[in-house]
Image (cartoon, helix red, strand yellow):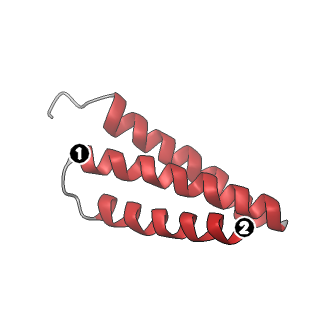
Amino acid sequence: MVDIIQWAATATGIVAAIMVAGKFSARITGIGFLIFTVSSIGWIAFAAMKGEPPLAIQNSVLLLVNLFGVYRYMIVKDAKA
């Protein structure tokens, strides 16, 4: 189970990074942040199971950043868009 979580967190992180860095559209970026959120949750779960506080802390902060990205790109739309 731990391996599945670790590999799922890795894969979702890679996909999300491509989506956000690719600057395809605001919608794709928002979905990328949503996928990053899933990745962060996976890494937090993995860190908790393996007793890795630094990884858990890092991804807890990244989870907040990713939730802000979801809010910014998927919930609140810029007037320019």
Q: Quadrant of residue 40?
A: bottom right
Question: Where's the N terminus, which quadrant?
Answer: bottom right
Please, what is the three-letter code of the amino acid marked with disc 1? Ala
Residue 77 seen from this side: yes
Residue 52 seen from this side: no
What separation in Å lies between label 1 and label 2 (alpha carbons)?
33 Å
**How many residues crowd mark 2 within 10 Å: few (<14), some (14–19), many (20+)?**
few
- x, y percent for residue 52: 80, 67
**How many residues crowd mark 1 within 10 Å: few (<14), some (14–19), many (20+)?**
some
Name the residue located 19 percent from the left edge and 50 percent from the top edge.
25
Disc 2 is placed on an element classified as: helix
Front one among 67 and 10: 10
**Residue at the extreme front of the image, as rendered:** 1
Q: How many marks?
A: 2
Name the residue located 47 percent from the left edge and 40 percent from the top edge.
68
Front one among 61 and 4: 4
Front one among 59 and 50: 50
Please, what is the three-letter code of the amino acid marked with disc 2? Val
- x, y percent for residue 42: 62, 57
The residue that mark 2 highlights is 2
Q: Quadrant of residue 26?
A: top left
Disc 1 is placed on an element classified as: helix
Answer left or right for 45 relative to 19. Answer: right
As drawn, 36 above or below 9: above
**Residue at the extreme right of the image, as rendered:** 51
- x, y percent for residue 24: 19, 57
The residue that mark 1 highlights is 26
Of the residues under marks 1 and 2, which one precedes in the sequence?
Answer: 2
